[in-house]
Image (cartoon, grey):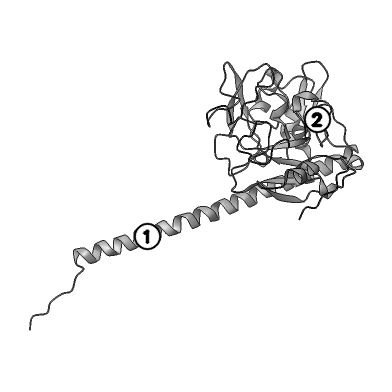
């Protein structure tokens, strides 16, 4: 007796392939969302590590690090708050390589300028960790409302040199940075010497450090490079626009996370601040002693 063998018809095979394609199409977004959730959590851990380092610095020196150190009219030597934290976050070897007597762009500090510190990099900001910083004469005010979406403060020429990026900047406050770079109403500004006791709004009500993506240019952990475009805004941010504001300026806070930005409050707690936060609440949290009454709910 002859036995016939069963096999898939062409139509059945095509149906199976189509079903597999649909399942893969459904699975990929879920995988991508899970990966982004993990990256966001790692970013949150980075922000918390910075907060612990700030508090350890404050315990040692009885004040917070200066936003950046300026001993001349050019804002030099310019080393910033994040560079001061290196000994408190397992970066003592890099800290010892830096000659803080000389500006960041001095040849003695060539190695430090290109040293990548993983804690300063958000894993969702997947671009290169080194970038060519553009020369400038101050505040270029690049923002999406008047420029193409890819425009950055580092598009200009000439380029100064390669430098390593950071995705975390200190909170300067609520008003235009260039109006008073040495007198912000937040936690970090030029030659600032803020103590935790100065934060009369309450540590849990005050934002200290937040994210900034590389969308509009590179931010720094090193500090203020006087010859660069937007030198002050490379290390501090301003809350005059909301997080990820579509018309945001370079000095604003933003991220590649969906829906918000990771911030560290002055009590070291980490919050994911929504893009849709009420601006009066956001700006009240950006000041250290504004005396604002607000609800975070």
Instruction: Please identify the quadrant where the C terminus is shown.
Output: bottom right
Residue at (72% x, 47% y) in the render: 278
- Position of 225 with respect to 183 (left or right) is left
Which residue occupies the extreme bottom position in the image? Answer: 1
- Looking at the picture, how far across and down is residue 127, in whole percent? 54, 36
Any part of residue 99 in sight: no
Instruction: Please identify the quadrant where the N terminus is shown.
Output: bottom left
Of 221 and 153, the residue lying toward us:
153
Mark drawn on residue 14: none
Q: CA distance from mark 2 to mark 1?
A: 53 Å
Of 189 and 47, the residue lying toward us:
189
Residue at (18% x, 74% y) in the render: 6
Which residue occupies the extreme left position in the image? Answer: 1
**Between discs 2 and 1, the one toward the N terminus:** 1
Of 142 and 88, the residue lying toward us:
142
Q: Secondary structure at mark 1?
A: helix
Q: Quadrant of residue 128?
A: top right
Mark drawn on residue 189: 2
Q: Secondary structure at mark 2?
A: loop
- Looking at the picture, how far across and down is residue 172, in whole percent? 78, 34
**Circle 1 Cα neighbour tier, 10 Å, few/some/many (<14 / 14–19 / ≥20):** few
**Whether residue 274 is situated above or below residue 154 in the rendered picture:** below
Check disc 1 and report the residue beneath it.
22
Residue at (39% x, 61% y) in the render: 23
């Amino acid at each position: 007796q002859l036995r016939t063998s069963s096999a898939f018809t062409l139509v059945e095979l095509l149906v199976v392939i189509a079903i597999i394609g649909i399942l893969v199409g459904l699975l990929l977004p879920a995988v991508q969302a899970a990966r982004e959730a993990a990256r966001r959590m790692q970013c949150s851990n980075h922000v918390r590590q910075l907060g612990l380092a700030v508090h350890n610095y404050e315990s040692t020196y009885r004040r917070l690090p200066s936003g950046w150190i300026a001993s001349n009219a050019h804002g030099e030597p310019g080393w910033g708050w994040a560079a001061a934290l290196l000994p408190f976050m397992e970066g003592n070897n890099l800290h010892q390589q830096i000659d803080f007597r000389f500006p960041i762009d001095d040849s003695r500090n060539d190695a430090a300028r290109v040293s990548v510190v993983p804690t300063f990099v958000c894993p969702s900001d997947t671009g290169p960790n080194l970038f060519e910083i553009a020369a400038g004469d101050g505040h270029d005010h690049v923002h999406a409302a008047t420029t193409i979406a890819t425009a950055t403060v580092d598009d200009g020429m000439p380029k100064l040199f390669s430098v390593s990026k950071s995705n975390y900047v200190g909170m300067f406050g609520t008003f235009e940075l260039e109006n008073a770079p040495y007198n912000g109403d937040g936690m970090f500004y030029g030659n600032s010497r803020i103590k935790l006791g100065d934060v009369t709004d309450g540590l849990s009500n005050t934002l200290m450090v937040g994210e900034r993506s590389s969308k509009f240019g590179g931010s720094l952990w090193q500090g203020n490079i006087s010859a660069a475009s937007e030198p002050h805004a490379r290390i501090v941010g301003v809350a005059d626009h909301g997080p990820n504001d579509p018309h945001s300026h370079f000095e604003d806070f933003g991220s590649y996370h969906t829906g918000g930005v990771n911030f560290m409050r002055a009590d070291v707690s980490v919050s994911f601040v929504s893009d849709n936060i009420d601006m009066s609440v956001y700006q009240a949290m950006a000041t250290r002693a504004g005396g604002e009454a607000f609800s975070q709910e």
